[in-house]
Image: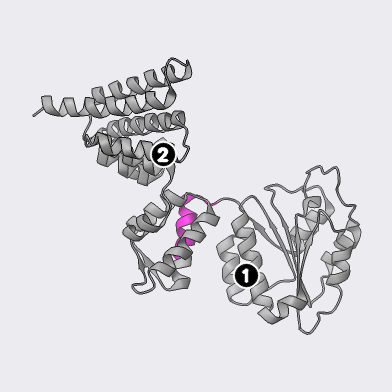
Amino acid sequence: MDYLELTQQLQKGNVEPLYLLYGKEEFFIKNITEKIVSAVLTEEERDFNYSVYDMKETPVEMVVEEGETLPFFGEKRVILMKNSYFLTGVKDKDKIEHHLPSFEKYIEKPANETVIIVTVSQDKLDERKKVVKKLKKQGIVLEASPYDERKVHQWMDTYLHEKEMEMTKDAKELMVHRAGKDMMMLASEMDKLSLYVTNSNQITGEAVDKLVSRTLEDNVFELVDCVVRGRTEHALSIYFDLMKQNEEPIKLLVLLARQFRLIMHVQQLKKRGYTRQKIASQLKVHPFAVKVAEGQMNAFTNQMLASILKELAQADYEVKTGKMDKSLRVEMAITKIAAFYTDIQKTTR
């Protein structure tokens, strides 16, 4: 079952006795677990009827025994079985011996008063194991895989609907660009934004830019933009700030080269009539990155871009061969590219 579909089922109060949540996207597993617990238990009942077992330390028969025990001061109990690596092919030298037949028998006829949530942060289970087959047949299964961009937008729309809020198109683009597909970060930043704009109930691009942490790539975009506009001092100011944050100069050099290559590719593909979405798909980058490159490409001819990439390649060579201090050489490259652009502008006036 998909995360959004399962969320809708839980919102309607449809809770089943067995859940299997597995995959690498921790946010989905933790979020669905919390939704199940909230749907079954009140805050007061959690202290008595919510148990968490680490299956790397607890034999499964102990969980079965509690699952068959009546709840204490309540109608239901919830049991979370985390780190259920016994469902996978992962080898563990110090693994606990689990008596799986007792759990398999429980799965066939789970207690009506108990909800068991089985979780493991692995993208593959051992499908040959009888316990896995039974869980998949009898329980509700969520494969917590990372979302693609389309599903990230769907998740954001669902979040906004639940909060009764709106978000502008440019804000969504910037948000996805900054948070990427890291759902934990995305959810945290959306929570922050929803608290910030409580008066207007609309999240704007300005709010995202102000509150959501800038990535290294964002700083490189701005650095390139300063070079494009011949703002050498500002470009160097950004560079020095990044050095204070202990960013690696060679990494910045790679990102600069990547950005200028992107500008060159976007420029060429635009001439061939490609749309922004098609360019993003062709180059395997986010549409927002293409949008930024579109805004920068008009400042350069193809020849200028070739010269800039040649300068960055030379800087890379001199740094890696130890011919020059890496921090100083990157600084020189930034200054030279900005000066090169300014000189070209003067000759074309």
Location of residue 197 with respect to 239 vertically, above or below: below
Question: SS of the residue at dot 2?
Answer: helix
Q: Which residues are magenta?
A: 147-157
Inspect the magenta stretch and tell me whether residue 196 lies in it. no
Q: Residue at x 64, y 50 (%)?
A: 24
Which residue matches tag 1?
A: 35
The location of residue 287, given as percent across then percent down, is 37, 45
Q: Residue at x 55, y 63 (%)?
A: 4
Residue sitting at 79 percent across and 62 percent down?
A: 53
In the picture, measured across the screen, residue 294 lies left or right of residue 140, that is left
Alpha carbon separation for disc pair 1 and 2: 40 Å
Give the overall secondary structure of the magenta segment: helix
Query: Label 2: few (<14), some or many (≥20) within 10 Å?
Result: some
Query: Where does the image place residue 239, in percent across and percent down from the top left?
Result: 36, 36
Number of numbered discs visible in the structure rendering: 2
Along the horizontal axis of the image, is 22 left or right of 250? right
Q: Earlier in the sequence, mark 1 or mark 2?
A: 1
In-image side of 347 versus 24 (left or right): left
Give residue 271's quadrant in the image: top left
Q: Nearer the viewer, mark 1 or mark 2?
A: 2
Residue behind mark 2: 242
Residue placed most toward the observer, 192 or 204: 192
- Identified by mark 2, the residue type is Leu
Residue density around tag 1, few if under 14, some if 14–19, many if 20 or more, within 10 Å: some
Q: Quadrant of the C terminus?
A: top left
